Structures are given as structure tokens and as C-alpha cells.
Amino acid sequence: MLILPMILVPAVLLGVLFTLPPKYMATAVVQLETATVRNLSAPNVDLLEKTLQSGGVLDTPLAQLGQPVDHLSEAEAEAVRKDFAKRLQLVPMEDQLVRINYITAEAATAEDILTTISLNFVQELMAPLRFRTDQSLSDLEGLIKQFSAKEKEVSAKLTALHLSLIHISEP
């Protein structure tokens, strides 16, 4: 009688394990070198998790998986993102290093999806810096145009002055 449970329980557990779909985890380690994330304290980790779950990070991988959200209402898109974000984990490792885990039943796409997520995540974090850089470039282009116009104006005046000098010096 005691032997039956010892055989039956492991057999049932093995049966359950073989019926569950396999889970795969892809992992990426990201170094964060932005001014917004000097250390990985609780408020910064919360900010990073919100960024990881944002549309700017998740919309492209969702489209890669055949679940585009651009045709959905904002509420529906947010629900799809939230459901997908359950498969992501953000794990602070040490100062300026985080690990992103992506859990899926599809081993073939896990690495590509995580790569897209990681790249989008870094781009979202760098967006303020990119904005400042773009603004600086725009300002510099404006200054170049201004100085170019001034240079043409000064060059025209010098040419006129040179012609005047030639005209005065001729007998």
C-alpha cells in the first residue's frame, strides 16, 4: 500500500511536467550611462521598469510577434503591453548594470525579440540626451547660416571698398 503512492506521485508529477509548454529565458545585460540613472536605487529602478514597459520599447517587438498595437485604442494597446511586460524582468546587478530577462515559449525568436527590446530600452533612456544633441545641432546650423550671411555681406563691402580704392588711386 505504501509503495503505490511512492510510484504514483512521481509518475503524476512527470506527466504534468511533460504536458506543460517549455519556457525559455533570454538574458541581456545593459550598461546604463545616462545622467538620469547614476545609481540603481528604488526610484530609479521604478523609472527603468516603467521605461521597459513603455510603448516606445514594446511596440516594435509586439509587431515582430504579430501583435501590432498601432491599430488599437490606447487602452487596448496598453493592456497588450502590460500583458507582454509580464514576460520581462528587470534585475539591477550593480551600479549602472541591469539584466533584462525575457521569458517565452518560443526559443527561435527569444534572442531577436530581446535584442529589439534592449535596443529600444537604451534608445528610450537616451532620448533626452538625443533631444539636447539635436537641439544643439539645430542651434549650430542656425549660427552657421548667420555667419555665412555676415561673411557674404562683409565680403561684398570689402569688394566695393577695394573698387573704390582702385578708382581713387587711378589718374
Image (cartoon, grey):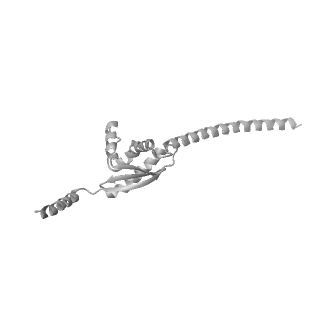
* Residue 53 percent across, percent down from the top left: 38, 44
The residue most toward the left is 1
Residue 89 seen in render: yes
Q: Quadrant of residue 76?
A: top left
Report the front residue among 16 and 170. 16
Report the front residue among 131 and 137. 131
The answer to whether 1 appears left or right of 142 in the picture is left
* Residue 15 percent across, percent down from the top left: 19, 60
The answer to whether 130 appears left or right of 86 in the picture is right
Q: Residue at x 46, y 48 (%)?
A: 122
Report the front residue among 79 and 42. 42
* Residue 99 percent across, percent down from the top left: 42, 52
Q: How many labels, in total?
A: 0
The quadrant of the rendering that contains the C terminus is: top right
110 vs 57: above or below: below
Q: Residue at x 55, y 43 (%)?
A: 133
Report the front residue among 149 and 25. 25
Residue 71 seen in render: no
Q: Residue at x 49, y 46 (%)?
A: 39
The residue most toward the front is 2
The answer to whether 73 appears left or right of 20 in the picture is right
The quadrant of the rendering that contains the N terminus is: bottom left
* Residue 142 percent across, percent down from the top left: 61, 38
5 vs 129: above or below: below
